[in-house]
Amino acid sequence: MDLDKPDPKLVIRNIGLVLSGKLEQPILDADCVVVIGKRIAAVGSARDLDTEDATTLIDAMGCTLAPGLIDSHVHPVIGDYTPRQQQMNWIDSTLHGGVTTMISAGEVHMPGRPKDIVGLKAQAIAAQRWYENFRPSGVKVHAGAPIIEQGMVEQDFKDLADAGVTLLGEVGLGSVKDGPTAKTMVAWARKYGLQSTIHTGGPSIPGSGLISAEVVLEADTDVVGHINGGHSALPDDQIICICDGCLRGLEIVHNGNERAALLTLNTTREMGKLDQVILGTDGPAGSGVQPLGILRMVAMLSALGNLPAEQAFCLATGNTARMRKLDTGMIEPGYAADFVLMDQAQHAPGASILDSVQLGNLPGVGMTIIDGVVTSQRSRNTPPAGRIPVVVRG
Ligand SMILES: [Zn+2]
């Protein structure tokens, strides 16, 4: 760090609508955000904020600013390449869908993935490092998520934690598929600070297995991975049982069963547990990669689930941040300056961007910002936004 040089200052002014990411107050009364360095310094009305001497000045042109979207469930392997569908630049494409943070549910598509214990630990440590050292197009990829196998002992989880690993991949994709073993290992993982998730529902591909509600609840992972199946969902009564019995993250994915997604939304809403619902894509997978997957989930849940769009965005931002203990996903001083700027898509029906999303339309992404730095401008993937932000200086 250059100690003589002050942190860069980013000012975004003329924002039409600020979405906070927080369910308790999804819309903020603000038109300006000030960022110092990589963090939000102030949010409010431009006339009340210190907007002088910005290193970078952005005129939002009336666009909507939201926290950068978080994909709670991805399967990266290496860099911006996935062997699953032989696809390059899928993370960059997803950035163009407004996603600025991704969380690995296991690097399971690595050809020849090691299943012996020392091998799976080595791969997890390596994956954690290469995504820490390299952010594809700026996207924060939290990876290095080992798949637990029979025979692991407590020391293995301590070794992983000591080496910098912070996640477990989907429980159930390896040889541990029974409740008691999963529960023991998940508890060891938690003891050493590793966050866990589980594969819920029928097998995803040949080789994976069925994980029932009973196993999900016994394993007690931090996140119930794809509660709506990946792709085969559990029977309705088991989904309702998980919603009822679980106090942790309930994750709905794009590559799952849409009907089960709506059942989860309606059930959690009735139970007053909407704050536990988080969104992921579960891509890359057999269903491909979904650059717009999170936006599609927001629009689908809003439209078919009758959820106000500003609340639907919270499921993809602040809810995930809270469940995953991230310093992003909310528009609040101190949080990472990760933003997506959007507008109603050209010729999309609706009286406003929120109305348009609740009618099932995708917004147009005009810009993404990660750690206070512009990472993309007009999206090459969303329908074109009516208005796009302009970099006035910087
Ligand atoms: Zn899965």
Image (cartoon, rainbow, N blue to C red):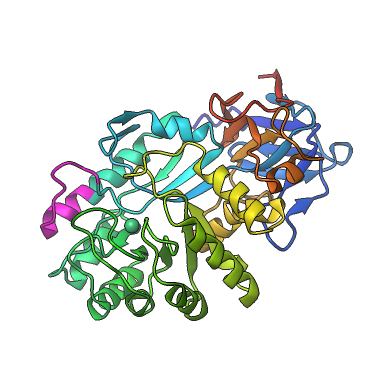
Across and down, in percent, residue 45 comes to 85, 41
Q: Is residue 391 left or right of residue 213?
A: right
Choose top left, top right, bottom left or bottom right for residue 285: top left
User: For the image shown, how many numbered marks are present on the structure?
Assistant: 0
Q: Is residue 307 left or right of residue 207?
A: right
The residue at the point 38 percent across, 45 percent down is 283
Segment tinted magenta in the rendering: 109-123
Outermost residue, right side: 47
Q: Is residue 375 left or right of residue 211?
A: right
Magenta stretch encompasses residue 119: yes
- Residue 300 appears in the picture as rendered: yes
Q: Quadrant of the C terminus?
A: top right
Of 186 and 241, which appears nearest the observer? 241
Choose top left, top right, bottom left or bottom right for residue 391: top right
Across and down, in percent, residue 216 comes to 36, 74
Across and down, in percent, residue 232 comes to 36, 60
**Residue 178 vertical position relative to residue 203 in the rendered view, above or below:** below
Taking the image in four quarters, ligand 1 sits in the one at bottom left
The residue at the point 51 percent across, 60 percent down is 259
The residue at the point 73 percent across, 28 percent down is 347
- Residue 325 appears in the picture as rendered: no
Magenta stretch encompasses residue 264: no
Across and down, in percent, residue 288 comes to 36, 39
